Amino acid sequence: MTTSTAKFAEKELSILIASSDDPGNRPLIEEFIPEILALCEKFGLSGQSGGSAPYAAGAIADAIRKLCLFQPLCPITGMDEEWFNVTDLGSEGQLFQNCRLSSVFKKLNGKAYYLDAIVWKTQTGSTWSGSAFLPGGTKIMSRQFIKQFPFTPKTFYIDVIEEEIAKDDWKFTIIDEKQLEEVFSYYQKPA
């Protein structure tokens, strides 16, 4: 028995494939059609109503997106089995990387940090990670220490002024220190 959800999906996918007549430019999802149809069939059998279907479909799509991008589905626990030793990669002494989220590291003293806590955004709209300076000269890093576990990663976008101070030497200054208040309500404020 094929559900109406699977029938609709099969029809739409066949139209997509038929409209893609360039053999050198095939739809990216073409090789996943059997799995997509199986998922649509399962979804059709799950008993979703018009009210719940958008939420269930959104949750499934979000879970698949995260899993394909190697992102965790639930908070990082910080438990010992989540870490592996990457001391050979670092210059900070013994260092551990989280096996569920590769942008989380932990020092031997137990302090863990998230590399992508802050992304700097320049006046031209470009974004990057690294460091920027407060107007008084204090350096702020993109990586920030995690207050506690369980931890759900969160990235904050902070506006900076990009200024070339010498040929190919750039300085990035934080425009509004108040933007950091939200960062430090979520992450550990530097001492």
Image (cartoon, grey):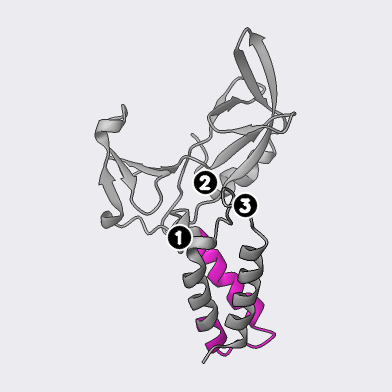
Q: Amino acid at mark 3?
A: Asp
Which residue appears at 72% of the width and 33% of the height? 125
Badge 1 crowding class, 10 Å Cα cut-off, few under 14, some 14 to 19, many 20 or more, is few
Which residue appears at 57% of the width and 46% of the height? 155
Q: What residue is shown with label 3? A: 22
Q: Quadrant of residue 93?
A: top left
Query: Outermost residue toward the bottom?
Result: 1
Look at the magenta stretch and give its main secondary structure. helix
Query: Outermost residue toward the right?
Result: 123
Q: Is residue 79 above or below residue 124?
A: below
What SS does tag 2 mark? loop
Badge 3 crowding class, 10 Å Cα cut-off, few under 14, some 14 to 19, many 20 or more, is few
Count of picture labels = 3
Q: Which residues are magenta?
A: 42-65
Precedes in sequence: disc 3 or disc 2: 3
Q: What residue is shown with label 2? A: 187
Q: Nearer the viewer, residue 157 or 22?
A: 22
Q: Nearer the viewer, residue 85 or 59?
A: 59
- Find residue 33 and report its horizontal and vertical position in percent: 51, 68
Q: What residue is shown with label 1? A: 67
Which residue appears at 55% of the width and 55% of the height? 28
Precedes in sequence: disc 1 or disc 3: 3
What SS does tag 3 mark? loop
Precedes in sequence: disc 2 or disc 1: 1
- Find residue 146 and report its horizontal and vertical position in percent: 45, 47
Circles 3 and 2, Cβ within 8 Å, touching? The answer is no
- Find residue 148 and report its horizontal and vertical position in percent: 43, 53
What SS does tag 1 mark? helix
